[in-house]
Amino acid sequence: MKKKIALWGSAALLALSGCQSTPPTATAPAAAPVAAAPAAAAAPPPAWQQGRSTAQASSPLAPIAGKLTVTPAADIKLDRLKLPPGFKIELWATGVPGVRAMSRGDSGKIYAGTRPLGRVYEITDNGTARTSRVLVDKLDQPATAMHKGNLYVMAVDKVLRYDGIESNPNVQPVDMTAVFQLPKEKHHNWKYLRFGPDGKLYVPFGAPCNICELPGPEYAQIRRYNPDGSGMEVIATGVRNSVGFDWHPVTQELWFTNHSRDWINDDLPEDGLNRLSAKGQNFGFPYCHVGNLPDPDIKKANPCAGVTPVVLPMGGHTAVMGLQFYTGNMFPAEYKNAAFIARKGSWNRTKKSGYDVVMVKSDPDGKNAKMTPFITGFLDSKDESFSGRPAYLLQMPDGSMLVSDEQMGAIYRVSYAR
């Protein structure tokens, strides 16, 4: 776009006096033109475009917008979903747009966070139907965890605790933000919360970019805290974006999912399932992915030296989300201690992948890991359309499993009958 630049001239002025005169042809010198204002700096690309090469500049790939309005139950096509023989999937709750990770209180109430909507839902089950209310709104991508009757809600910039909320639904929250030392950058800083077997609160803090040198050591890590926010420890580094984890039923070691970077190609780097066997292990970001793939843009000598490899690569850009080890008695014996993982589905891939729930079986030390489909049918491979994006899992006391669908704003119940 051409910029119009104003130029100023000055009229010629003649100075007259009784003893001097200016020749009639003389004029004052023209004023110098005013310099053009410097052009405004170009806006940086959106965060999801970071790492995109010039050859990829015309790519139509972009994040898939979530559906953040209520989906009627009649529009949720469960008949498209396929599970192993004997398993049944049914609609358990609807009307909770953007629902993500779920936590359960002793009374049976479910608390679930969202991302763009900034809501926390409270879902009540009366045995035959579920109702929901918005507990808190307009937070920045909150997640929840229950601990000893108290609900913890953590957003990018806030930590709230609702004491005894199940028996006192109008309780006012305790603001615990100051003690948690939250990093300020927003990208990949949405939360997943869970209390571990040690009674401590585990929280990931993702990388503030698609791929970059980290601006500080407080990113790309997993931390744990005492319930009051004290005693903060960094237990894992080099973790780009973990939004799901659980503890192995046999070893009590932390296993977690992790999203790898975008814009290398359709298949690389793969997302991964990881195992933390010792405090302080490094999982590679930004120099190394899945333990053996050096990054082509952010380089250093021996980038994968000392990096903990993945238990299992889980497909390029599949968006691995919630992880739940199965410890119930409803499912057949071969499912005991297996990991169920929701893969919300790709956007940075020319042919979509994920959009399913898979089962991973392995030795307790992570060896001999094998992934098999568990719930498929959300994605129609013929035309690449999809009818849901499974996000998180929650095992219920009776051994059934809840699965949240962020796209449909629904929660499904998976059960097994012999």
Image (cartoon, helix red, strand yellow):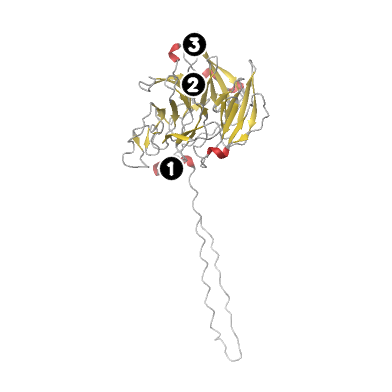
Secondary structure of the residue carrying tag 2 is loop
For the residue pair 409 and 184, the one nearer the viewer reads as 184
Which residue position holds label 2?
A: 377
Dot 3: element: loop
Q: Mark 3 or mark 2: name the one nearer the start of the chain.
A: 3
- List x then y, in percent, for residue 205: 48, 36
- For residue 215, what is the image quadrant? top left
* C-beta proximity under 8 Å, tags 1 and 2: no
Q: CA distance from mark 3 to mark 1?
A: 48 Å
Amino acid identity at mark 1: Leu
- Name the amino acid, label 3: Gly
Of label 3 and label 1, which has the lower sequence position? 3
Q: Earlier in the sequence, mark 1 or mark 2?
A: 1
Disc on res. 214 = 1
Q: What distance separates the C-alpha of mark 3 from that of mark 2?
A: 17 Å
User: Residue 92, percent across and down?
Assistant: 59, 19
